[in-house]
Amino acid sequence: MSRLSHSEVHMVHRIGWLRAAVLGANDGLVSTASLVVGVAAAGSGRPEILIAGLAGLVAGAMSMAAGEYVSVSSQTDAEQADIARETRELKETPEAELEELTRIYVGRGLDEGLARQVAIQLTEKDALGAHARDELGISETVTAHPIQAALVSAATFAVGAVIPLIIAALVPAAQITLIVAATTLLALSVLGGLGASVGGAGIIKGAIRVTFWGALAMAATAAVGMLFGVTVG
């Protein structure tokens, strides 16, 4: 195969939606399973457990969407403000901006003459794009998309949250706590490994990390459920 026809797919190209998707599914699975385990540990019946889990699913999905939208919107606002400032500076002080771009390329290893030649050519082609990319670190690959992040977070949270709800609805009521906890840990290990694999990281490390914190969350809510169950009873 010719080198010219060779194409590469880098992990950074999908870091935006991947981050939102992994966090959403992770949070949905952990928080809803923890809620189900905690309510079950308190001695509640299946209807109460399912109602609590479903309420957690809806509230969590909306919270994830709102939080992600606000967070990413703030990043977008900052990016747009920087772009507006660069646009103004390019109009008012083009020579200073050209020198600034030259200094950046010199700092990256080019000699003075070549750095200025590169800066001139890139400025002639797309001055704002060159400054956005090389001075500000903003490119289409990593540009924030608030609505996309919000929708992905809500959807993946719901997908993760559905798993413990289905298990709680199907297994014997007396075994909800044990089976939901076990299946959640298994699902978390798979999810952690998958997320690490797609992101280019170590599968085992990713699986262990996610499973550990999930187990800790469920243990904490189970303890609360048993404590208040005994107190109320």
Image (cartoon, rainbow, N blue to C red):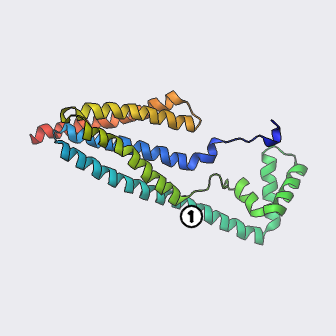
* Residue 168, above or below 56: above
Which residue corresponds to the image point at 57% horizontal and 61% vertical from the top-left? 76
196 left or right, relative to 217:
right
Which residue corresponds to the image point at 82% horizontal and 38% vertical from the top-left? 3
Element under disc 1: helix
Q: Position of residue 25 (x, y in %)?
A: 43, 44
Which residue corresponds to the image point at 64% horizontal and 63% vertical from the top-left? 82
Q: Where on the picture, by quarter, is residue 58?
A: bottom left
Q: Where on the picture, by quarter, is residue 98?
A: bottom right
The residue carrying mark 1 is 77
* Residue 167, above or below 112: above
Quadrant of the drawing holding the N terminus = top right
Crowd around label 1: few <14 · some 14–19 · many ≥20 (10 Å): few
For this orientation, the residue located farthest to the top is 204
229 left or right, relative to 73:
left
Which residue corresponds to the image point at 33% horizontal and 37% vertical from the top-left? 217
Q: Where is residue 200 in the image (x, y as percent from the top left)?
A: 59, 35
* Residue 91, above or below 134: below
Query: Of residues 168 and 205, which is closer to you in this image?
Result: 168
141 left or right, relative to 150:
right
For the residue marked with disc 1, what is the amino acid?
Asp
154 left or right, relative to 6:
left
Quadrant of the drawing holding the C terminus = top left
